[in-house]
Amino acid sequence: MGARLLAIGTALALTAGAAATAQDVRVGMITTLSGGGASLGLDARDGFMLAIEQDGREGLEILIEDDERSPDRAVQLADRLVQAEDVDILTGIIWSNLLMAVAPSATAQGVFYLSVNAAPSQLAGANCNPLYFSVSYQNDNLHEAAGAYASSAGYANTFIMAPNYPAGTDSLTGFKRFYEGELAGEVYTELGQTDYAAEISQIRASGADSVFIFLPGGMGIAFVRQYAESGVDIPLIGPAFSFDQGILPAMGEAALGVYNTANWSNDLDNETNAAFVASFQEAYGRLPSVYAAYGFDTANLMLSALDTASPDDAEAFQAALEAAEFDSVRGEFTFNTNHHPIQDIYVREVVMDGDVLTNRIVETAMEDRGDAYADQCSF
Protein backbone atom coordinates (compact mmCIF):
# COMPACT_ATOMS: atom_id res chain seq x y z
CA MET A 1 0.00 0.00 0.00
CA GLY A 2 2.73 2.44 0.97
CA ALA A 3 4.07 2.63 -2.58
CA ARG A 4 0.87 4.34 -3.71
CA LEU A 5 1.29 7.22 -1.27
CA LEU A 6 2.97 9.99 -3.29
CA ALA A 7 4.65 13.05 -1.77
CA ILE A 8 3.06 16.32 -2.89
CA GLY A 9 4.74 19.25 -1.15
CA THR A 10 4.29 18.57 2.56
CA ALA A 11 1.29 16.35 1.87
CA LEU A 12 0.74 12.73 0.98
CA ALA A 13 -1.93 11.94 -1.57
CA LEU A 14 -3.62 8.83 -2.88
CA THR A 15 -5.92 8.84 -5.86
CA ALA A 16 -8.08 5.73 -6.17
CA GLY A 17 -8.44 4.71 -9.80
CA ALA A 18 -8.34 6.82 -12.92
CA ALA A 19 -7.59 10.50 -13.52
CA ALA A 20 -9.61 13.13 -11.72
CA THR A 21 -12.75 14.56 -13.28
CA ALA A 22 -15.05 17.43 -12.42
CA GLN A 23 -17.12 15.01 -10.33
CA ASP A 24 -14.22 13.89 -8.12
CA VAL A 25 -14.41 13.98 -4.33
CA ARG A 26 -11.42 15.33 -2.41
CA VAL A 27 -10.80 14.37 1.21
CA GLY A 28 -8.30 16.11 3.47
CA MET A 29 -6.87 13.97 6.25
CA ILE A 30 -5.02 15.94 8.94
CA THR A 31 -3.52 13.66 11.56
CA THR A 32 -0.47 13.19 13.78
CA LEU A 33 2.29 11.38 11.89
CA SER A 34 5.42 12.58 13.71
CA GLY A 35 6.53 13.45 17.21
CA GLY A 36 4.57 12.59 20.33
CA GLY A 37 1.44 10.58 19.61
CA ALA A 38 2.46 9.69 16.06
CA SER A 39 1.53 6.03 16.51
CA LEU A 40 -2.10 7.05 17.05
CA GLY A 41 -2.29 9.04 13.85
CA LEU A 42 -0.44 6.40 11.86
CA ASP A 43 -2.95 3.77 12.96
CA ALA A 44 -5.92 6.02 12.13
CA ARG A 45 -4.42 6.73 8.71
CA ASP A 46 -3.66 3.08 8.00
CA GLY A 47 -7.14 1.91 9.00
CA PHE A 48 -8.72 4.63 6.86
CA MET A 49 -6.56 3.90 3.84
CA LEU A 50 -7.13 0.14 4.14
CA ALA A 51 -10.84 0.74 3.59
CA ILE A 52 -10.12 3.07 0.66
CA GLU A 53 -7.85 0.47 -0.95
CA GLN A 54 -10.37 -2.32 -0.44
CA ASP A 55 -13.11 -0.21 -2.03
CA GLY A 56 -10.96 0.77 -5.01
CA ARG A 57 -13.36 3.27 -6.56
CA GLU A 58 -12.27 5.88 -9.10
CA GLY A 59 -12.32 9.63 -8.65
CA LEU A 60 -11.61 9.74 -4.92
CA GLU A 61 -8.52 11.66 -3.81
CA ILE A 62 -7.15 11.60 -0.26
CA LEU A 63 -4.72 14.37 0.75
CA ILE A 64 -2.86 13.43 3.94
CA GLU A 65 -1.09 15.98 6.13
CA ASP A 66 0.91 15.78 9.38
CA ASP A 67 -0.32 18.18 12.06
CA GLU A 68 2.69 17.43 14.32
CA ARG A 69 0.21 17.66 17.25
CA SER A 70 0.23 21.45 16.88
CA PRO A 71 -3.10 23.37 16.88
CA ASP A 72 -1.57 26.23 14.87
CA ARG A 73 -0.27 23.86 12.21
CA ALA A 74 -3.59 22.00 12.10
CA VAL A 75 -5.43 25.27 11.46
CA GLN A 76 -2.98 26.28 8.72
CA LEU A 77 -3.34 22.90 7.03
CA ALA A 78 -7.12 22.96 7.26
CA ASP A 79 -7.29 26.47 5.80
CA ARG A 80 -5.13 25.42 2.85
CA LEU A 81 -7.04 22.19 2.26
CA VAL A 82 -10.40 23.97 2.35
CA GLN A 83 -9.52 27.19 0.53
CA ALA A 84 -6.77 26.17 -1.90
CA GLU A 85 -7.28 22.42 -2.37
CA ASP A 86 -11.09 22.68 -2.30
CA VAL A 87 -11.65 19.52 -0.28
CA ASP A 88 -15.20 18.33 0.31
CA ILE A 89 -14.53 16.43 3.54
CA LEU A 90 -12.01 16.75 6.37
CA THR A 91 -11.04 13.97 8.79
CA GLY A 92 -8.17 12.48 10.77
CA ILE A 93 -7.53 14.62 13.86
CA ILE A 94 -6.61 12.64 16.99
CA TRP A 95 -6.38 15.36 19.66
CA SER A 96 -9.39 17.30 20.95
CA ASN A 97 -7.56 20.64 21.26
CA LEU A 98 -6.65 20.41 17.58
CA LEU A 99 -10.16 19.41 16.60
CA MET A 100 -11.64 22.36 18.49
CA ALA A 101 -9.32 24.62 16.49
CA VAL A 102 -10.29 23.10 13.12
CA ALA A 103 -13.79 21.61 12.98
CA PRO A 104 -15.96 24.68 13.74
CA SER A 105 -14.19 26.73 11.07
CA ALA A 106 -14.39 23.92 8.51
CA THR A 107 -18.10 23.33 8.99
CA ALA A 108 -18.75 27.08 8.90
CA GLN A 109 -17.24 27.02 5.39
CA GLY A 110 -19.57 24.21 4.32
CA VAL A 111 -17.06 21.36 4.62
CA PHE A 112 -18.08 18.08 6.25
CA TYR A 113 -15.94 16.91 9.15
CA LEU A 114 -15.85 13.18 10.03
CA SER A 115 -13.94 12.53 13.24
CA VAL A 116 -11.85 9.38 13.47
CA ASN A 117 -11.14 9.94 17.16
CA ALA A 118 -11.46 13.24 19.03
CA ALA A 119 -15.02 14.05 20.11
CA PRO A 120 -15.11 16.88 22.68
CA SER A 121 -18.25 17.57 24.66
CA GLN A 122 -18.63 21.05 23.17
CA LEU A 123 -19.21 19.61 19.68
CA ALA A 124 -21.66 17.04 20.98
CA GLY A 125 -23.79 19.59 22.80
CA ALA A 126 -24.51 23.28 22.31
CA ASN A 127 -21.89 23.71 19.56
CA CYS A 128 -22.96 20.73 17.48
CA ASN A 129 -23.19 21.19 13.71
CA PRO A 130 -25.09 19.22 11.05
CA LEU A 131 -21.89 18.85 8.99
CA TYR A 132 -19.91 17.39 11.91
CA PHE A 133 -19.98 13.66 12.69
CA SER A 134 -18.01 11.72 15.28
CA VAL A 135 -17.60 8.14 14.09
CA SER A 136 -15.61 7.06 17.14
CA TYR A 137 -17.53 7.99 20.33
CA GLN A 138 -18.15 11.05 22.48
CA ASN A 139 -15.07 11.84 24.60
CA ASP A 140 -16.74 10.91 27.89
CA ASN A 141 -17.94 7.47 26.79
CA LEU A 142 -15.08 5.08 27.50
CA HIS A 143 -14.38 6.86 30.78
CA GLU A 144 -18.03 6.60 31.80
CA ALA A 145 -17.74 2.85 31.35
CA ALA A 146 -14.56 2.81 33.45
CA GLY A 147 -16.38 4.62 36.26
CA ALA A 148 -19.24 2.13 36.08
CA TYR A 149 -16.76 -0.77 36.10
CA ALA A 150 -14.85 0.65 39.09
CA SER A 151 -18.06 0.77 41.08
CA SER A 152 -19.17 -2.72 40.07
CA ALA A 153 -15.72 -4.06 40.97
CA GLY A 154 -16.14 -2.68 44.49
CA TYR A 155 -13.60 0.15 44.36
CA ALA A 156 -14.61 2.95 46.72
CA ASN A 157 -11.66 5.36 46.82
CA THR A 158 -10.21 5.92 43.36
CA PHE A 159 -7.39 8.31 42.40
CA ILE A 160 -8.11 9.81 38.95
CA MET A 161 -5.69 11.51 36.57
CA ALA A 162 -5.68 12.92 33.04
CA PRO A 163 -3.85 15.54 30.94
CA ASN A 164 -5.07 19.12 31.09
CA TYR A 165 -6.77 19.55 27.70
CA PRO A 166 -10.37 19.13 26.47
CA ALA A 167 -10.32 15.33 26.23
CA GLY A 168 -8.71 15.11 29.67
CA THR A 169 -11.45 17.22 31.21
CA ASP A 170 -14.09 15.13 29.45
CA SER A 171 -12.43 11.91 30.62
CA LEU A 172 -12.59 12.71 34.32
CA THR A 173 -16.08 14.18 33.95
CA GLY A 174 -17.16 10.96 32.28
CA PHE A 175 -15.57 8.73 34.92
CA LYS A 176 -17.26 10.61 37.75
CA ARG A 177 -20.66 10.45 36.05
CA PHE A 178 -21.02 6.69 36.73
CA TYR A 179 -18.57 6.19 39.60
CA GLU A 180 -20.28 5.82 42.97
CA GLY A 181 -17.31 5.93 45.37
CA GLU A 182 -15.07 8.62 46.83
CA LEU A 183 -12.08 10.23 45.13
CA ALA A 184 -8.66 9.77 46.73
CA GLY A 185 -7.35 12.49 44.44
CA GLU A 186 -8.05 14.26 41.13
CA VAL A 187 -5.03 15.49 39.17
CA TYR A 188 -4.53 17.11 35.77
CA THR A 189 -1.07 16.67 34.26
CA GLU A 190 0.64 18.48 31.40
CA LEU A 191 -0.22 17.30 27.90
CA GLY A 192 2.78 15.33 26.64
CA GLN A 193 4.26 14.88 30.12
CA THR A 194 6.75 12.02 30.50
CA ASP A 195 7.90 12.24 34.14
CA TYR A 196 5.27 11.12 36.66
CA ALA A 197 7.36 10.80 39.82
CA ALA A 198 5.41 13.53 41.63
CA GLU A 199 2.02 12.08 40.68
CA ILE A 200 3.07 8.56 41.70
CA SER A 201 4.13 9.92 45.08
CA GLN A 202 0.70 11.51 45.43
CA ILE A 203 -0.96 8.20 44.60
CA ARG A 204 1.20 6.35 47.11
CA ALA A 205 0.19 8.73 49.90
CA SER A 206 -3.47 9.05 48.91
CA GLY A 207 -4.93 5.92 50.48
CA ALA A 208 -6.49 4.99 47.13
CA ASP A 209 -7.76 1.49 46.47
CA SER A 210 -7.58 1.99 42.70
CA VAL A 211 -6.19 4.39 40.09
CA PHE A 212 -7.91 5.58 36.91
CA ILE A 213 -5.67 7.10 34.25
CA PHE A 214 -6.40 8.63 30.89
CA LEU A 215 -2.93 8.98 29.39
CA PRO A 216 -2.94 8.21 25.65
CA GLY A 217 0.10 7.31 23.55
CA GLY A 218 3.56 7.98 24.94
CA MET A 219 2.14 9.47 28.11
CA GLY A 220 0.60 6.13 29.02
CA ILE A 221 3.79 4.25 28.21
CA ALA A 222 5.85 6.52 30.45
CA PHE A 223 3.41 6.38 33.35
CA VAL A 224 2.87 2.60 33.35
CA ARG A 225 6.60 1.89 33.21
CA GLN A 226 7.34 4.31 36.05
CA TYR A 227 4.36 3.07 38.06
CA ALA A 228 5.56 -0.54 37.83
CA GLU A 229 9.10 0.47 38.80
CA SER A 230 7.78 2.42 41.81
CA GLY A 231 6.39 -0.67 43.48
CA VAL A 232 3.04 1.02 44.19
CA ASP A 233 0.70 -1.96 44.20
CA ILE A 234 -2.68 -0.30 43.59
CA PRO A 235 -4.79 -1.64 40.69
CA LEU A 236 -4.90 0.45 37.51
CA ILE A 237 -8.01 1.09 35.42
CA GLY A 238 -8.08 3.05 32.19
CA PRO A 239 -9.76 3.57 28.84
CA ALA A 240 -8.45 1.78 25.77
CA PHE A 241 -6.39 4.84 24.88
CA SER A 242 -4.07 4.15 27.83
CA PHE A 243 -3.71 0.42 27.09
CA ASP A 244 -4.19 0.15 23.37
CA GLN A 245 -2.59 -2.30 20.95
CA GLY A 246 -0.18 0.26 19.54
CA ILE A 247 1.43 1.03 22.91
CA LEU A 248 1.20 -2.30 24.77
CA PRO A 249 4.51 -3.64 23.39
CA ALA A 250 6.33 -0.61 24.79
CA MET A 251 4.67 -1.06 28.19
CA GLY A 252 5.63 -4.72 28.40
CA GLU A 253 4.51 -6.97 31.22
CA ALA A 254 3.80 -3.96 33.45
CA ALA A 255 0.43 -3.72 31.65
CA LEU A 256 -0.58 -7.36 32.18
CA GLY A 257 -3.88 -7.79 33.99
CA VAL A 258 -4.97 -4.17 33.68
CA TYR A 259 -8.68 -3.68 32.95
CA ASN A 260 -9.60 -1.04 30.40
CA THR A 261 -12.75 0.03 28.59
CA ALA A 262 -13.33 0.18 24.84
CA ASN A 263 -16.08 0.22 22.24
CA TRP A 264 -14.01 -2.10 20.04
CA SER A 265 -11.52 -4.95 20.45
CA ASN A 266 -9.57 -7.29 18.20
CA ASP A 267 -11.64 -10.20 19.52
CA LEU A 268 -15.06 -8.58 19.05
CA ASP A 269 -17.10 -11.37 17.51
CA ASN A 270 -18.55 -10.30 14.18
CA GLU A 271 -17.69 -11.15 10.57
CA THR A 272 -16.67 -7.62 9.55
CA ASN A 273 -14.28 -7.27 12.47
CA ALA A 274 -12.64 -10.65 11.86
CA ALA A 275 -12.03 -9.71 8.22
CA PHE A 276 -10.71 -6.28 9.23
CA VAL A 277 -8.24 -7.66 11.79
CA ALA A 278 -6.94 -10.24 9.30
CA SER A 279 -6.59 -7.77 6.42
CA PHE A 280 -4.95 -5.13 8.61
CA GLN A 281 -2.38 -7.66 9.84
CA GLU A 282 -1.71 -8.76 6.28
CA ALA A 283 -1.31 -5.20 5.02
CA TYR A 284 0.77 -3.75 7.87
CA GLY A 285 2.26 -6.67 9.79
CA ARG A 286 0.73 -5.72 13.13
CA LEU A 287 -2.52 -6.01 15.04
CA PRO A 288 -4.86 -3.02 14.65
CA SER A 289 -5.62 -0.60 17.48
CA VAL A 290 -8.83 1.23 18.34
CA TYR A 291 -7.52 4.14 16.27
CA ALA A 292 -7.15 1.88 13.23
CA ALA A 293 -10.65 0.50 13.79
CA TYR A 294 -12.11 4.02 13.98
CA GLY A 295 -10.24 5.02 10.82
CA PHE A 296 -11.56 1.96 8.98
CA ASP A 297 -15.14 2.65 10.07
CA THR A 298 -14.87 6.34 9.18
CA ALA A 299 -13.75 5.57 5.65
CA ASN A 300 -16.47 2.97 5.16
CA LEU A 301 -19.15 5.33 6.48
CA MET A 302 -17.94 7.98 4.04
CA LEU A 303 -17.88 5.52 1.14
CA SER A 304 -21.39 4.33 1.93
CA ALA A 305 -22.66 7.91 1.86
CA LEU A 306 -20.84 8.60 -1.41
CA ASP A 307 -22.72 5.65 -2.93
CA THR A 308 -25.94 7.63 -2.74
CA ALA A 309 -25.07 11.34 -2.58
CA SER A 310 -22.40 13.93 -3.32
CA PRO A 311 -21.01 16.36 -0.72
CA ASP A 312 -22.03 19.09 -3.18
CA ASP A 313 -25.60 18.33 -2.12
CA ALA A 314 -25.06 18.92 1.59
CA GLU A 315 -28.57 17.96 2.66
CA ALA A 316 -28.51 14.65 0.78
CA PHE A 317 -24.99 13.79 1.87
CA GLN A 318 -25.83 14.56 5.51
CA ALA A 319 -28.83 12.25 5.28
CA ALA A 320 -26.68 9.51 3.74
CA LEU A 321 -24.16 9.81 6.57
CA GLU A 322 -26.94 9.75 9.17
CA ALA A 323 -28.27 6.52 7.67
CA ALA A 324 -24.89 4.87 8.39
CA GLU A 325 -25.52 2.05 5.94
CA PHE A 326 -22.16 0.33 6.26
CA ASP A 327 -20.79 -2.76 7.99
CA SER A 328 -18.99 -1.54 11.11
CA VAL A 329 -16.23 -3.46 12.87
CA ARG A 330 -18.26 -2.76 16.02
CA GLY A 331 -21.33 -4.57 14.72
CA GLU A 332 -24.56 -2.58 14.70
CA PHE A 333 -23.85 1.13 14.21
CA THR A 334 -26.35 3.95 14.80
CA PHE A 335 -25.94 7.70 15.14
CA ASN A 336 -27.63 9.67 17.90
CA THR A 337 -29.43 12.93 17.08
CA ASN A 338 -26.17 14.85 17.61
CA HIS A 339 -24.20 12.73 15.10
CA HIS A 340 -22.35 10.71 17.76
CA PRO A 341 -22.63 6.91 17.97
CA ILE A 342 -24.97 4.87 20.12
CA GLN A 343 -22.96 1.77 20.97
CA ASP A 344 -21.92 -0.91 23.44
CA ILE A 345 -18.79 -0.37 25.57
CA TYR A 346 -16.76 -3.28 26.92
CA VAL A 347 -14.30 -4.05 29.69
CA ARG A 348 -11.09 -5.61 28.38
CA GLU A 349 -8.14 -7.21 30.16
CA VAL A 350 -4.53 -6.96 28.99
CA VAL A 351 -3.36 -10.53 28.38
CA MET A 352 -0.47 -12.38 26.77
CA ASP A 353 -1.54 -14.24 23.63
CA GLY A 354 1.46 -16.39 22.78
CA ASP A 355 4.24 -13.84 22.83
CA VAL A 356 1.99 -10.86 21.98
CA LEU A 357 0.45 -8.49 24.53
CA THR A 358 -3.13 -7.71 23.59
CA ASN A 359 -6.61 -7.16 25.02
CA ARG A 360 -9.50 -9.56 25.48
CA ILE A 361 -13.12 -8.63 26.25
CA VAL A 362 -14.25 -9.83 29.68
CA GLU A 363 -17.67 -8.18 29.99
CA THR A 364 -20.00 -5.52 28.64
CA ALA A 365 -19.96 -2.35 30.73
CA MET A 366 -22.68 -0.39 28.92
CA GLU A 367 -25.22 -1.26 26.24
CA ASP A 368 -26.51 1.18 23.62
CA ARG A 369 -24.80 4.13 25.29
CA GLY A 370 -25.31 7.49 23.64
CA ASP A 371 -23.87 10.50 25.44
CA ALA A 372 -24.72 13.10 28.04
CA TYR A 373 -24.86 16.05 25.67
CA ALA A 374 -27.29 15.06 22.87
CA ASP A 375 -30.22 16.89 24.43
CA GLN A 376 -28.21 20.13 24.25
CA CYS A 377 -27.80 19.82 20.48
CA SER A 378 -30.24 21.30 18.00
CA PHE A 379 -29.49 21.66 14.30
Image (cartoon, grey):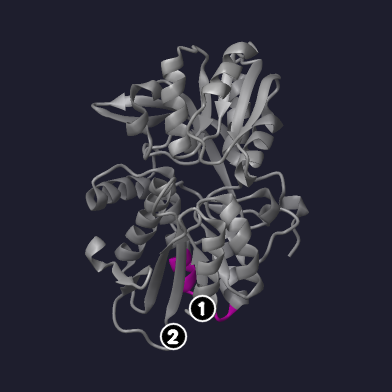
Whether residue 240 is visible to the viewer of this picture, yes or no, is no
Whether residue 182 is visible to the viewer of this picture, yes or no, is yes
First in sequence, mark 2 or 1: give its number.
Answer: 2
Using the image as rendered, state which of residue 226 and residue 90 is in the foreground. 226
Using the image as rendered, state which of residue 144 and residue 344 is in the foreground. 144
Q: Helix or strand or loop: what does disc 2 sit on? A: loop
Which circle marks residue 207 in the picture?
none
Q: Residue at x 39, y 70 (%)?
A: 62
Image coordinates of residue 320 in percent, x first then y, are: 55, 69
Span of residues in magenta: 302-313
Q: Which residue is mark 1?
A: 310
Q: Quadrant of the N terminus?
A: bottom left
Amino acid at the residue labelled 1: Ser
- Packing grade of label 2 (10 A; few <14, some 14-19, many >=20) is few
**Left or right for 31, reference 163:** left
Magenta segment includes 304:
yes
Task: Kindly indicate whether the residue at mark 1 contacts the one at mark 2 (C-beta within 8 angstroms).
Answer: yes
- Packing grade of label 1 (10 A; few <14, some 14-19, many >=20) is some
Q: Residue at x 22, y 65 (%)?
A: 3
| Distance between mark 2 and mark 1 Cα atoms | 9 Å
Q: Helix or strand or loop: what does disc 1 sit on? A: loop
Image coordinates of residue 16 in percent, x first then y, are: 32, 73
